[in-house]
Amino acid sequence: MTTLLKFVQDLLHQAQGPLTRELVLEPGDFGLGQVPAKSKPDATTDMICGYCATGCSLRVHLKDGQGINLTPTSEYPVNLGMACPKGWEALTVLDSPDRATTPLLRDDAGKLKPIAWDEAMRTFSDRFKRIQSEHGPHSVAFLSTGQITTEEMAFLGALTKFGMGMLHGDGNTRQCMSSAAVAYKQSFGFDAPPYTYADFEESDVIVLVGSNLCIAHPIMWERVMRNPHSPKIIVIDPRMTETAMNATQHLSIAPKADQSLLYGVARIFIENDWIDQQYIDESTNDFEEFAKFVSAYNDERVATETGLTIDQIHRFAETIHEGKRVSFWWTMGVNQSYQGVRTAQAIINLALMTGNIGRPGTGANSITGQCNAMGSRLFSNTTNLLGGHDFTNPEHREKIANILDIDPALIPTKNSLPYHKIIDGILRGEIRGLWVICTNPAHSWINQNQCRDILDRLDFLVVQDMYHNTETAKMADLVLPAAGWGEKEGTFINSERRIGIIKKVSKAPGEALSDFNIFKLVAHYWGCTEMFKDWKSPEEVFQILKQCSAGQPCDFTGIENYQFVDEQKGVQWPYSDSDDNDQERRLFEDGQYYHPDRRAKFLFEEPRPLTEPPTDLFPFILLTGRGSASQWHTQTRTRHSAVLRKLYPEDTFVEINPVDARRLQISPGERVIVESQRGRIVAKAVLTPVIQAGQLFIPMHYESVNQLTDATFDPYSNQPSYKACAVRVVMN
Ligand SMILES: Nc1nc2c(c(=O)[nH]1)N[C@H]1C(S)=C(S)[C@@H](COP(=O)(O)OP(=O)(O)OC[C@H]3O[C@@H](n4cnc5c(=O)[nH]c(N)nc54)[C@H](O)[C@@H]3O)O[C@H]1N2
Ligand SMILES: Nc1nc2c(c(=O)[nH]1)N[C@H]1C(S)=C(S)[C@@H](COP(=O)(O)OP(=O)(O)OC[C@H]3O[C@@H](n4cnc5c(=O)[nH]c(N)nc54)[C@H](O)[C@@H]3O)O[C@H]1N2
Ligand code: SF4
Ligand SMILES: [Mo]
């Protein structure tokens, strides 16, 4: 047997081997009567949920080391014993005939055929190396995710960039968080969401901008509901979402008019002297210019641009002024825009000028999406060098090279192309090989017909996924079968910067391997085993990343090991030896930011009109987003739970205002065609006043939705503007 084959067999053997190492023996602790009497569990172990960035802890009940059921962990400071339907069903979706169980290679007849790992790995490195030797090292790129562990992301980023010579690699966090990340970097000097979830309970005013907590972060909404101060809740969203229905004020703003509103409110604060001058003087820069800039946002202008009444605008401003602890929260209604960064900063500016930051119940708080988006923002080696460092800074390269014990010359001196430029690169024939890990761009990327056409041009497409039949896997030349959440171990970082652990409580089906082990295998076949000799297990990589974080705002050098994270019930960064590990910690309590002069910046810019305004031919503005608490993204996982399937509509649907429906003679439940300049899809009409007249809403979970969306991007963050394009509705 060759040594390579033996290496594969060792990994497979390991994958079939013992399950989670820490079997916490707590007989009888199986809560809420969820476990059938026949399979009485013999132990439980706690781990972080693998869907959204809330980062709830789930107590998995084990029988012979195998997870057989779960209950939300009551003592965890995030979810306090609660979970949403996806969390409750997290184990169920692992078991499905759609799981990828062996590597699959496209044969000459165009069919994906099972092959052994050895052949898969030889093909992987032969094909990619051939492309690189013909077209240069940068002709192969990768697209990854916010849904694998931090250790896996770091391994992928280091392997591709330091080992395989790639320059370009980005992640689905570009679709999601990049506007927030850039806004924080520019305003605060580091990508640092400042809050802790306790702030939801300590605010007396909660402002939610483009954020539908009830659906997208249900347990954060539960935290709002536990707030004992009868908070005023203001929701800014064109739709009357579930969250807006439960708010004390709903501002049904015109799409993409948020900047105008927030600048207008800033102007009202200044005119009434409702600002915290001392905070502005001591902790910020450029307020004078900002004050001058917003003076042009008078009531009439703001009312016209936002579609709100002057009364609504003033009431909003007064409510913030009267609040003692005001927190501002935003999600995709802000980030997914051609002006997402400046809109996020318009929110940050309000928090800074009123001194609503660094105190309990305050903050300019971006809510993250995926379970480990925060890990990817700092440790994926895509937009930052490991640990929030800068590829273009020679000292940073030197520091990371020393820690990894590699030649600094191996670290790229340039930043990667962002996601959409990688796609453009494929179109231009400059990028010819692509490795897609834990994301499904053939469904989720903007302007889907164009995206699929471009992916089709690749010489070699590798897709590494839990399931063999995702829209992107179906296009692949090679599919690598991955273990999922619950079948491997490592750490996630949640929205409030809390590091938590996931564990192996179930065996991956067939020959599926954890992403970590796949990266190890690739390193081996590529010939860079030596470079990763210390990257033996996720926990050993955690120790390496800890060193990379030293001295950074995200320093977590005070964490000893995984067990410590478990015992502490997660640890929020920063956590160096000198920090106290309080269960809830927020940033900027001392008014000091991360820019060299320790001050935050006021950043602002004239808003731009819609990139694709409605016309006579395409008179509606299409909004897209999350549809229900039971659906996750492209549905590859959630569709495998019978319980979840009962909780959401199976067919693609479009929300239409009854006034528009009457005018177009559309009846409830009728199938209509929704069409943009790029695509034409069929959807079931749902008539509801939740959506304003002149607007439509289609959830992103249905495969066809991105046939309609328009590929425009924020110029600073390069985030796609998923939430506004022009469409028409016609009878089917
Ligand atoms: N159940 C479920 N939960 C999820 C996810 C999931 O797929 N399913 N995905 C997770 C991920 S990755 C993410 S990123 C988050 C997303 O979480 P959210 O951002 O809360 O969800 P979305 O529905 O995408 O968008 C929020 C709202 O933005 C509004 N909006 C659109 N345009 C504008 C605008 O111009 N201004 C304003 N103010 N609002 C606007 C939409 O009407 C929508 O109600 O959810 C996470 N949680
Ligand atoms: N129109 C529109 N489009 C959108 C959005 C929108 O609001 N509107 N939102 C955007 C946002 S915010 C996001 S985050 C993206 C999400 O878009 P995607 O990332 O494409 O969506 P997912 O379905 O989460 O894809 C994750 C894939 O990884 C696989 N997977 C799960 N766990 C593992 C694992 O451990 N290892 C491996 N290797 N694979 C695994 C899953 O089976 C799935 O195929 O969609 C974006 N697209
Ligand atoms: S709210 Fe998010 S983290 Fe919590 S159980 Fe639901 S999906 Fe999982
Ligand atoms: Mo996201």
Image: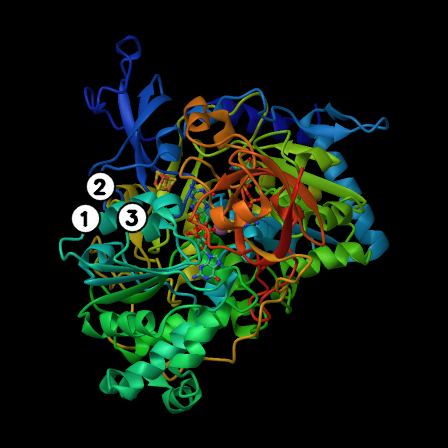
Near mark 2 (Cα within 10 A), the count class, few <14, some 14-19 or many ≥20, is some
**Residue at x 29% of width, y 48% of height:** 221
Quadrant placement of the N terminus: top right
**Residue 302 seen in the figure:** yes
Q: Nearer the viewer, mark 3 or mark 2?
A: 3
Q: Quadrant of residue 546?
A: bottom left
Q: Amino acid at mark 1?
A: Arg
Q: Please tell me whether residue 74 is drawn above or below residue 540 in the rendered image.
A: above
Residue 226 disc label: 1
Q: Amino acid at mark 2?
A: Leu
- Name the foreground residue: 534 vs 638: 638
* Gap in angstroms between the C-alphas marked 2 and 1: 11 Å
Residue 221 disc label: 3
Mark 1 residue's CB less than 8 Å from ligand 3:
no
- Name the foreground residue: 378 vs 522: 378
Residue 80 disc label: 2
Q: Earlier in the sequence, mark 3 or mark 1?
A: 3
Q: Please tell me whether residue 12 is drawn above or below residue 214 in the rendered image.
A: above
Q: Amino acid at mark 3?
A: Trp
**Residue at x 57% of width, y 47% of height:** 532
* Gap in angstroms between the C-alphas marked 3 and 2: 13 Å
Residue 586 falls left or right of residue 471: left
Q: Please tell me whether residue 513 is drawn above or below residue 510 in the rendered image.
A: below
Type of colouring: rainbow
Whole-percent x and y of residue 137?
76, 57
Whole-percent x and y of residue 620?
59, 56
